[in-house]
Each structure stands twice: as structure tokens, then as C-alpha cells.
Image (cartoon, rainbow, N blue to C red):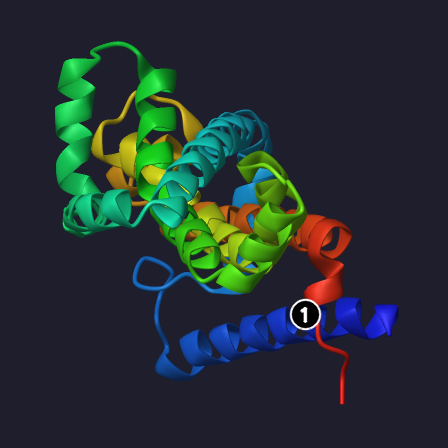
């Protein structure tokens, strides 16, 4: 039921908050060691304007980086999915690139594009989030049953028609599954650039400010704000999945 889909996640988050509060209280941790949920509302009230401004800066750059990752990841996945040669050639390169810690790439990007703060941040968000999309689309297309292709080709269907009518719908469940992962990765990329290469923009810069001033409630408030933004984008993807790939959802037992 619809109410259950809303109530259960809210109840889970409430239980997590209560557990967090109890953990801090039982251990007697001061807020400069571990801030508790009750320490966060004053931080939001004090810095609400900065949360709005910097939260928007983080959000739009993350979304742009994610959209670029979707476009590039789908295109790359199509190339690897339809060509075994390209799949064998590109997979090692992609795995090697993805194995490089992106925190080590951030200073390089910052030096290459000095002053282009928005571009730098979007680029890191894109670089860290396109990999699962490309792999999922590639796997979905490469496992397409050859019988479908043979039948459609015998009926005169072009490669484009086969892609739109058979390959793309089959790939959608894997695509949206990867997109749910890519959403969180895009936020990680954005905040890596904002923290490692500070330029006074985004929630990463606000987190860094809290660290510099030993304002631990502010730091934890930033983390929770990032988590809530990630949850928001996740449910946007879930809504899109229900529209475009709702047929793949299994009926509850």
C-alpha cells in the first residue's frame, strides 16, 4: 500500500535517529566528539541561509554531473554491448580507471582547470558515476537473446529498430538499478571536489568550515543534509523507474 511505502522508510529513519541519540547518551560523548541528533536543529537554525545557498550549489552540480554520466554511460554501454571487440578492449580500461581513488584525481583536475570551480566539480561527479551505468547497459545488451535479433532481422528490422523495440526495454531494469548507485556516487564526487579543493561553494565547503572552526554539530548537520538530498534523488529515480520500467517489478508475495 502507498501509506506503507511512506511510513516504513520514515519509521526506519526515526529508529536510526533514536539509536544514534541513545548511543551518544549512553557513552557520554560531548558534541565535539560525536554530535547527536538533538544537536542538529540549532545548527540548521543558525546557518539555515548557508544550507539553502550551498545546498543548492551542491545539488545542481551533482545533477548536471549525473545527467552527463547517464548520457555518456548509456552511449559507452551501447558500444560495448553490441560489439564484443569493443567490450574486450574497453572493460580493462574502465576497470583500471575506476580503481583509481578519485580523491587523488581531484588535485590534478583542480590544477588543470584552475578557477573553473563549477566545471571541476561537475567533472568529478561525472567521472565517479558513469561507470556503473556503462557496465549495466553493456551487460543488458550483451545478454540479449540472439533469437530475438534473428527473428526481427528476418522481418526486415534494422539495428536501430531492434535496439528501440527489444534491447532498450530489456536493459531498463539494469539501467535503473545502476542509476540508483550512480546517484550516491555523484554526490561523493561533488563533495570530494568541494572538500579536497575548497573554493567556498557547496555543502562540502560548509563541512570544511565546520571542521576548521571545530563546530562538530555543523559538520554532522552537513552530513545529514547530504544524506537527505541523496535520498531525495534516489526516490526521483524510483519514480522514473516505475514510469518506464514498472513492468519489471515483481508482484509482492
Q: How many marks?
A: 1
Q: Residue at x 66, y 53 (%)?
A: 235
Which of these two is toward me, 215 or 76? 76
Task: Give percent across and percent down for residue 95.
Answer: 20, 51
> Eyeballing the image, is 246 above or below 185?
below
Q: Can I make out residue 232 in this image?
A: no
Task: Give percent across and percent down for residue 56.
Answer: 56, 28
> Eyeballing the image, is 18 above or below 47?
below
Q: Which residue is mark 1?
A: 9
Element under disc 1: helix
Task: Give percent across and percent down for residue 110.
Answer: 19, 21
Task: Give percent across and percent down for residue 45.
Answer: 61, 40
Q: Residue at x 55, y 24 (%)?
A: 53
Q: Please, which residue is most extreme toward the front here?
A: 154
Q: Residue at x 50, y 80 (%)?
A: 22
Q: Residue at x 33, y 45 (%)?
A: 83
Which of these two is toward me, 34 or 172? 172
Amino acid at each position: 500500500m502507498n501509506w506503507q511505502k511512506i511510513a516504513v522508510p520514515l519509521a526506519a529513519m526515526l529508529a536510526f535517529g533514536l539509536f544514534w541519540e541513545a548511543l551518544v547518551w549512553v557513552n557520554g560523548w560531548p558534541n565535539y566528539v560525536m554530535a547527536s541528533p538533538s544537536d542538529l536543529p540549532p545548527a540548521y537554525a543558525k546557518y539555515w541561509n548557508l544550507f539553502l545557498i550551498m545546498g543548492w550549489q551542491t545539488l545542481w552540480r551533482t545533477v548536471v554531473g549525473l545527467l552527463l554520466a547517464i548520457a555518456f554511460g548509456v552511449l559507452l554501454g551501447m558500444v560495448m554491448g553490441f560489439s564484443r571487440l569493443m567490450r574486450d578492449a574497453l572493460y580493462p580500461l574502465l576497470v583500471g580507471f575506476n580503481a583509481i581513488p578519485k580523491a587523488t584525481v581531484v588535485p590534478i583536475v583542480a590544477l588543470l582547470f584552475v578557477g573553473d570551480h563549477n566545471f571541476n566539480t561537475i567533472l568529478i561527479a561525472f567521472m565517479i558515476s558513469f561507470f556503473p551505468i556503462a557496465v549495466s547497459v553493456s551487460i543488458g545488451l550483451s545478454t540479449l537473446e540472439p533469437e530475438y535479433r534473428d527473428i526481427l532481422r528476418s522481418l526486415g528490422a534494422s539495428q536501430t529498430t531492434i535496439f528501440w523495440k527489444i534491447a532498450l526495454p530489456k536493459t531498463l531494469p539494469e539501467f535503473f538499478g545502476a542509476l540508483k548507485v550512480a546517484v550516491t556516487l555523484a554526490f561523493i564526487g561533488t563533495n570530494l571536489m568541494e572538500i579536497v579543493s575548497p573554493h567556498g561553494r557547496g555543502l562540502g565547503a560548509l563541512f570544511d568550515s565546520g571542521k576548521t572552526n571545530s563546530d562538530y554539530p555543523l559538520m554532522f548537520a552537513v552530513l545529514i543534509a547530504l544524506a537527505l538530498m541523496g535520498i531525495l534523488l534516489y526516490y526521483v529515480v524510483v519514480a522514473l523507474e516505475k514510469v518506464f520500467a514498472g513492468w519489471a517489478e515483481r508482484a509482492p508475495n
